[in-house]
Image (cartoon, rainbow, N blue to C red):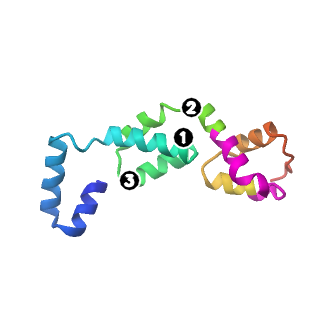
Amino acid sequence: SELYTKLCRSFDSDCADAACDKMEEYGLVNDEEYCKAKTEYLINVKKCSLGETRAKLLTLGINKDIIESCIDLYNKDDEAENLRVLIEKKYLHKLDQPQKVIAALMRKGFGYYEIKSALNDLQIETEDDY
């Protein structure tokens, strides 16, 4: 889908479709392998949440079933570790306003209780009325 879209910028839709079919026939295009590699990159390098990873893969036009099979390779422990690392690297200096940090992490797809748990593990005090 992403390849087709890029080819359509320079060629008509019939040529783009034919090129995609040939590339698939030769084994040059494999959504499952691409999805696995992109999932690994988003989770292990970019420290994205599982939800954010799922959303980004959907925007690339990858089939939902393929995405779910790739996401299923990771678990909540991986996500919790990513959250802890993300807090330590990116948000530690901003923790004078913990509610803003919580809001930012929630926008990145992490759950409220997972964030609170990670902050508690790091022994960071937050207000419970958020």
Nearer to us in this view, 87 or 79: 87
**Mark 3, residues whose alpha carbon is within 10 Å: few (<14), some, or many (≥20)?**
few
Q: Residue 13 vs residue 98: left or right?
A: left
Q: Earlier in the sequence, mark 1 or mark 3?
A: 1
* CA–CA distance in space, label 1 to label 2: 12 Å
Q: Main secondary structure of the magenta part?
A: helix
* CA–CA distance in space, label 2 to label 3: 22 Å
Residue at 27% x, 55% y is 3
Q: Which residue is mark 2?
A: 75
Amino acid type, callout 3: Leu
**Mark 1, residues whose alpha carbon is within 10 Å: few (<14), some, or many (≥20)?**
some
Residue at 75% x, 59% y is 100
Provide residue 58's location: percent of width, then percent of height: 41, 50
Please provide the residue range marked out in magenta: 82-100
Q: Residue 57 vs residue 21: left or right?
A: right
Q: Secondary structure at mark 2?
A: loop
Mark sitting on residue 44: 1
Q: Which residue is mark 3?
A: 60
Residue at 41% x, 33% y is 69
Occupied quadrant, residue 10: bottom left
